Amino acid sequence: MTDSIPPPPSPEVGYVPEPIFEKPPILTRVLETAEDKIREPLARRKFFQRLFLLDRDWMTRITMLMLIGAMVWGVIGGLDAYGFQSQAYDYATSGTITLTNQEIYSSITLHGLRMLFGFAQQLEMALFGLLAINAMGVKPRHKWALYTSVGLINASIMLLEGPFYIWPAFNDNYFPSLGWTFSSPLGIQGQSAYAIGPLWFLGWYALTAAVLIWAGWMLVHFRDWLRSRPAGAAGRLPVSLLFVFATVILIPITYGPLLVSTTWDIGTYYLGWGLNPLVNQVIFWMFGHGIVYVLFLIPVAALYLLIPILSKRPIYSYRFAILAAVLFIILTPLLGIHHLFLTALPTWATYTTMVLSFLIIIPSAVTFFSLWMTMKGVRRSQWEWNIVALFALLAFAGSIAGGLSGPDVATIGANVDLHNSLFVLSHFHTITILAIVTGAYAVLYAVFPLLCGRLWFSMWLARIHFLTTAIGGIIIVVCFEGLGTLGILRRQILFPNVPAVDLYNVILFAGIIVILVGQLFFVLNGFLTAYRGRPIVTSGLSFDEAIRAAARSTYVGSTVPVQDVPVQRKATRARREHVEKLWVGSVIVLIVVVLAAATPQALSVTNGITSAANAPAGSEYVTLSGQQYYWTVNETGPIRGTFDNAIVAYAGQWISVNATATGATQSLYIPFRSLPMVNVQVVPGSDSYALFQAPSTPGVYGAPDGEFDGPWFGQDAAALIVLPAVGASDLSAFQSGGGAGDIYNPPILTAASANLVGDSEGLFNHSIPGPTLYAGAGVVSFRWEVPLSSIGTNNYLVNVTSNDKNAQQQYVIDRNYTLPYPVGIYEITATHGLRLVTAPQSLRINRVINESVLLASGVYLYGLVSPVSYSYNPGGQSNGSTGSQLGEVMGLWGVLWVGP
Ligand SMILES: [Cu+2]
């Protein structure tokens, strides 16, 4: 540094040495030069210059980059949803699916990741950064911190996707299909049979770093604003910036737990740390819940910004807005446990979380009341339904609709019926599509012209975009609600093929196509606006007036002037706050009433899961051990024995369940229609309990695993077999009740006329378990076959994963059409479990078998009644760095009921 010592100051020329710390660090200088080198030649091309605003200041350029990044992930994430639902559509209409299980579940996981983080989180960062810098009037600083954040968030989405190979054969099947919801320890090597590659964890780190850097960058500018105010000035943040600030505060509180949970996963994966999956899940859900509020503050800030501007009035109550912001910040990190109500967490923890979850209604109630009162009474001549106003209104309605279904799922008693069903997705997508996305679009339509200096190119494209988003979004949430109410689980691709479920799936697919196509109109309009839009004139306009000028370009024949008008409110501030207090007071009274009503059931549910209740004399004691994709069932009591995926009890008998799991969180989900449902989550390392009474009608009751535990989770379905109290009765009562009214109960077929055909999922007639066959005592005959055409990647019977579509069938042909799995008919005995009553035989493929056996009255299992080991290993590339997937799968089995 000797050569760079500045000369002493010379009083003659007033020379002041440049302080060394104001010189940018060497790295920044190198980056600046590199950026200029890339930008200048590109900026000479009109296309790039207009699209990326390359001739503009760095803040504008980076914001544009983030908006483009967000839209790219939004479109890809939308195609992911299309990919999943196209398969559900195929299964609903033709009973076959073409993608592999691995691809199907990857697409739904990546849909969530790309939409929440690549799209919504990045969009929030772009919009909030732009709003804050402009509204506070501070000079943006730390360009390279912002660039780093943008680089990391986009890199994180690619890392979360996991490894894929181009050579020797293209293989992208190691997508992380374990789910962003993280059912720890699923995916962690050494803890789970399904292990994910390390890029997944790096992706979470990159995402956390990206968002934390951005939050720090924002804090610096908030501090700049505080310092820039003249001493003693009573300046306050614009009301929408309060919520931008709340988001910035909420981010470390939300992403911190993600950092802890990811580090724990990695420590367990590579360093052999001990793992407590339940505690890890609690930590993860502090993030999982918090992220929804971090993103929900998009529409909240959007409405606090736009409603006053569009109404030309200040917000109804600034002080209540502060109260709402503070309550959002305090309550949000405390609510994660409401995603774990059915695990064996202590009752005090689940109950307290339920109460706190209800309290978060208060800041929402304050917000939407204030916004409503701000708009109330605006004269018709001062209001126009431009696209900004329409999207804002939709965000308002969507927030209320989504807010109303929230308390349903947050009530422990109702959670038993709704947990992990598509009802939850209906609630969630009402918030994400109809509130968050629409709120973001309202802001985008308002600020994009200011950003690129051009008015919206086409108001018709904007209208089509609004209509398709609204219609598609509403179709999606209505279909999810319908499916969820029927009991269909999220991520379930092998659903019961009943007409209502099939129809909802077809309409849902249409809704997804409508909303996806609609977004293309927005992308087109955005592109044309940046490229061909007329310049916007904002000189002499206030910020509010400029927003109105931008909004006007989305309205045909606008007559409302953009100018601010002075407002003289009739009601004094004291009066308005009095009204707010009355409103909040009545909301609190309602919350207390609902909580009081929901408490007894909440306590009985959680107490029942955490500890064994006193079982009445004569109960059946069932020990469930959850494996990857099936249950081992051990029974003592009037019935003794060991079964796979079958729980056996007498009609009306009490059943006391003690359940554990290894490798992945499982859930015992028995959706009774006329009795209280059974829904208990079983997390490895914790015991869960259930005490319930078997139905009084004998029959076969379906019991799917309600918790996603890997790509074979669709096959993960057990049966509660309810035997008649004395001897074998016929099934007529069960059958005449429509299989007890539940779609999960297998259909009943008369054995003699049954034609059981194995399908490409390794199921008989698309049913899990297979159809229940009914016959009278004597010679029982039925016909079954597993055609060669049913053998493929998704048929668990052939343990060959290959990119070659014919490899599985060739494997069967090479083994002379015989697979080494025992099939037969097994009697369920009360004292010895299962007893084989046919001659032992191996599974023959492509041969029609006509069974004909002399059977006494009783209940039997038929088919392949034990699980088959499965290993997913395309091209032999499965290992610790790419991920691996093992499991024990069952499908080709069912119940044979021999009546008197
Ligand atoms: Cu939540």
Image (cartoon, helix red, strand yellow):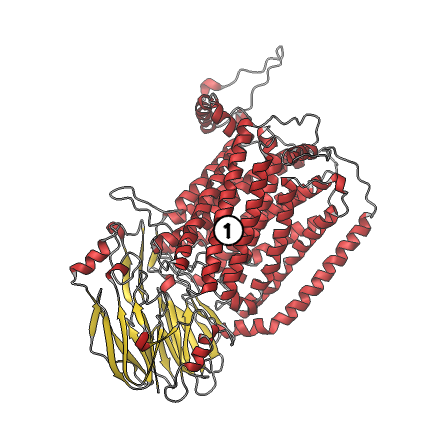
Q: Type of residue at label 1?
A: Gly
> Is 413 situated left or right of 792 in this image?
right
Quarter holding ligand 1: bottom right
Q: Position of residue 574 (x, y in %)?
A: 81, 50
Give neighbour class at mark 1: few <14, some 14-19, many 20+ (Cα, 10 Å).
Answer: many
> Is 495 situated left or right of 391 in this image?
left
Residue matched to label 1? 511
Name the quarter where the N terminus is drawn: top left
Foreground residue among 666 and 306: 306
Residue extending farthest to the front is: 753
Q: Residue at x 57, y 28 (%)?
A: 533
Residue extending farthest to the bottom is: 726
Helix, strand or loop at disc 1? Answer: helix
Q: Residue at x 74, y 49 (%)?
A: 373
Q: Is residue 755 visible?
A: yes
Q: Position of residue 177 (x, y in %)?
A: 38, 53
Q: Position of residue 397 (x, y in %)?
A: 64, 51
Q: Where 31 falls versus 379 (above or below)?
A: above
Name the quarter where the C terminus is drawn: bottom left
